[in-house]
Image (cartoon, rainbow, N blue to C red):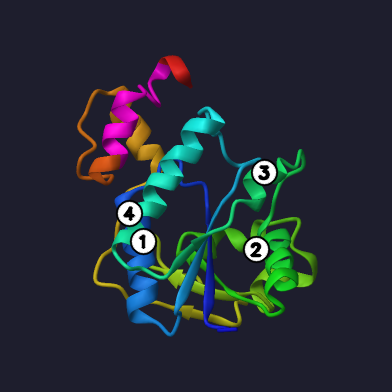
């Protein structure tokens, strides 16, 4: 089995053009040959505010587009179906994939996470800083903080972005266009199902 696999664990709520850019950059500009997309479901730092069926369909639309682009990706739905009532952590995700793959994959992060890791109270023996295999993608307005970090790579992409799912929701509620923030198919699904309006969140 190919060991150059990366885990992209994120909310994808909704999937954005920046998510697409990250995936393309990792596959085109690193030694990673396959990315496993891992939508999370229960995290204490996230507010999902969307029906499960709608989120699943948004993610499937995104996956179908990635496959049409011939990107080597796979969807892992374990953490959506698991519905654990406790906070799901990067540590748990890593252990799950080590058991499933029989080796440790890389994990894809934006550079803002380098600011946050040291605050993670659930991080046993600084596992995330030292043992986790990490790929960092530059994010606009967030410098990379390398203090006490080991076992990582910084991918120098041509773009830096501040596109986030939160920004998309804010634009929807302000009745601003989101066509430059998401793929056309994602935009159409959001509009047709009236997702993320203030009445729904």
Question: Which residue is denoted by mark 4 in the rendering?
Answer: 65
Q: Secondary structure at mark 1?
A: helix
Query: Which residue has dot 2 on it?
Result: 118
Give the residue drawn at x 50%, y 63%: 74
Residue that label 1 marks? 67
Q: Few, some or many C-alpha atoms within 10 Å of disc 3 (few <14, some 14-19, many ≥20)? A: few
Which mark identifies residue 81? 3
Tell me which label, 2 or 3, sits earlier in the chain: 3
| Left or right: where 138 falls relative to 74 | left
Mark 3 residue element: helix
Binning the other alpha carbons within 10 Å of mark 1 as few (below 14), some (14 to 19) or many (20 upward) gives few
Separation of residues labelled 1 and 2 (CA atoms): 36 Å
Q: Residues within 10 Å of mark 2 (few under 14, many from 20)?
A: some
Q: Residue at horizontal 35%, vertical 22%?
A: 194
At label 4, counting other C-alpha atoms closer than 10 Å, the crowd grade (few under 14, some 14-19, many 20 or more) is some
How far apart are labels 3 and 4 at the CA level?
22 Å
Q: Please name which of the two marks, 2 or 4, marks the residue nearer to the observer.
A: 4
Distance CA(mark 2)–CA(mark 3): 29 Å
Using the rendered view, name the quadrant where residue 157 is placed: bottom left
């Amino acid at each position: 089995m190919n060991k150059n696999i990366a885990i992209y664990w994120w909310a994808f709520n909704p999937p954005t053009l920046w998510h697409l850019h990250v995936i393309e950059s990792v596959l085109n500009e690193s030694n990673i040959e396959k990315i496993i997309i891992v939508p999370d479901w229960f995290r204490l730092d996230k507010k999902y505010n969307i029906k499960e069926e709608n989120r699943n369909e948004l993610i499937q639309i995104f996956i179908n587009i990635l496959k049409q682009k011939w990107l080597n990706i796979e969807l892992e739905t374990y953490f959506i179906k698991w519905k654990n009532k406790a906070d799901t952590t990067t540590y748990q995700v890593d252990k799950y994939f080590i058991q499933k793959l029989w080796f440790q994959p890389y994990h894809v992060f934006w550079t803002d996470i380098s600011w946050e890791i040291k605050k993670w109270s659930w991080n046993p023996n600084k596992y995330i800083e030292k043992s986790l295999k990490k790929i960092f993608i530059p994010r606009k307005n967030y410098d990379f903080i390398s203090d006490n970090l080991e076992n990582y790579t910084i991918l120098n992409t041509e773009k830096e972005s501040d596109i986030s799912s939160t920004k998309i929701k804010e634009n929807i509620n302000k009745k601003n266009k989101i066509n430059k923030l998401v793929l056309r198919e994602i935009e159409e699904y959001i509009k047709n199902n009236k997702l993320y309006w203030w009445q729904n969140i």
